[in-house]
């Protein structure tokens, strides 16, 4: 079963711009995004190389909460 659906917003796990899933072929995802000059780019990526925007935001929020918790403990009066 595919992890993403058409229209999902994803990014390469290694970083880069957010992309939109345009088409799915087995576990390969054709994604499109705009480059810095506004040109529409398209390429195909395997499922294991992608992460959803929601998962990135979830992990970021968890890291912020953990940092705040540590910061608060270290600087208690």
Image (cartoon, rainbow, N blue to C red):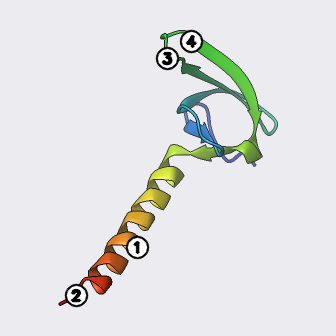
Q: Quadrant of residue 14?
A: top right
In this figure, which residue is indicated by the disc labeled 1?
Answer: 66
In this figure, which residue is indicated by the disc labeled 4?
Answer: 40
Is tag 2's residue or tag 1's residue first in the polypeptide sequence?
A: 1
Is tag 2's residue or tag 4's residue first in the polypeptide sequence?
A: 4
Q: Nearer the viewer, mark 3 or mark 2?
A: 2
Label 3's element? loop
Query: Are the two marked residues, 4 and 1, in contact with CB atoms closer than 8 angstroms?
Result: no
Q: Nearer the viewer, mark 2 or mark 4?
A: 2
Whole-Å distance between the Cαs marked 4 and 1? 37 Å
Label 1's element? helix
In this figure, which residue is indicated by the disc labeled 2?
Answer: 76
Q: Residues within 10 Å of mark 3 (few under 14, many from 20)?
A: few
Q: Nearer the viewer, mark 4 or mark 1?
A: 1
Number of the label disc, if any, that sits on residue 36: 3
Query: Are the two marked residues, 3 and 4, in contact with CB atoms closer than 8 angstroms?
Result: no
């Amino acid at each position: 079963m595919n992890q993403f659906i058409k229209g999902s917003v994803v990014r390469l796990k290694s970083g880069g711009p957010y992309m939109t899933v345009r088409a799915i072929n087995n576990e390969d995802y054709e994604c499109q995004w705009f480059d810095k000059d506004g040109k529409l780019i398209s390429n195909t990526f395997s499922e294991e190389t992608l992460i959803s925007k929601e998962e990135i935001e979830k992990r970021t929020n968890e890291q912020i909460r953990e940092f705040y918790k540590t910061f608060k403990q270290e600087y208690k009066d």
